[in-house]
Amino acid sequence: MDGGLGTVLTPTDIVMACSADSMEEAIEFSGRLLVCRGSVSAEYIEGMKQRERVVSTYLGNGVALPHGVLESKQYIRSTGVVVAQYPRGVDWGGCGTAHLVVGLAAVGDDHMRVLSQLASVLQDEELCRELAQVDDAASIYECLSAVPSDDD
């Protein structure tokens, strides 16, 4: 992955006003988005669910970052990021309420690059609250894609 998040996140990778009855449903939805964008094969979704059984991917500030376990890396075709916004929130296994679910599939070291680029946004509690309630994907895209990479 070269450059910022704009190279692995497009405006069409952001789905607004989602609702889910469970964390598992939200993970499956994010996984299907990654499949649709061609970043992973369908088997990767099970790896995302396995990861959640091992350790929560809830990061705080209303953000969860579901991604697969190491064994599911074989199902990754390319690095991809998808965002599903849940204005009413989804209980994330008792760890918190997720309003932004950022699905991730990463090749090689891209996982750490994506996380470091998202960190400045995700640590801003007020910004996360705003992104959870905005009504257009462009706002989320602009915010996340504006994050500079370490190479910039």
Image: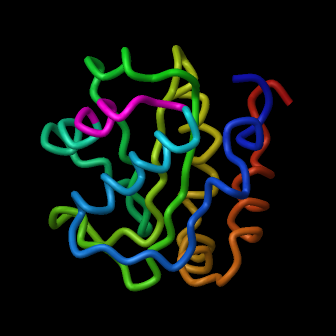
Q: Quadrant of residue 124?
A: bottom right
Which of 110/125 is in front? 110
Left or right of 134 in this view: 77: left
Q: Residue at x 57, y 84 (%)?
A: 133
Which of 51/36 is in front? 36
Left or right of 144 in this view: 91: left
Residue 137 against residue 114 in the figure, above or below: below
Is residue 83 within the magenta segment?
Answer: no
Residue 149 rendering spot, x and y as whole percentages: 75, 34
Which quarter of the figure is the C terminus placed in?
A: top right
> In this figure, what is the number of numbered marks?
0
Which quarter of the figure is the N terminus placed in?
A: top right
Is residue 45 within the magenta segment?
Answer: yes
Left or right of 97 in this view: 35: right
Residue 24 rendering spot, x and y as whole percentages: 22, 57
Specify start and end residues of the magenta stretch as a single range. Answer: 39-47
Left or right of 2 in this view: 43: left
Residue 33 against residue 93 in the figure, above or below: above
Q: Residue at x 56, y 66 (%)?
A: 15
What is the image's colouring? rainbow
Q: Residue at x 49, y 63 (%)?
A: 84
Residue 110 rendering spot, x and y as whole percentages: 57, 24
Residue 67 rendering spot, x and y as whole percentages: 37, 38
Which of 147/30 is in front? 30
Q: Residue furthest right?
A: 152
Q: Residue at x 62, y 53 (%)?
A: 13
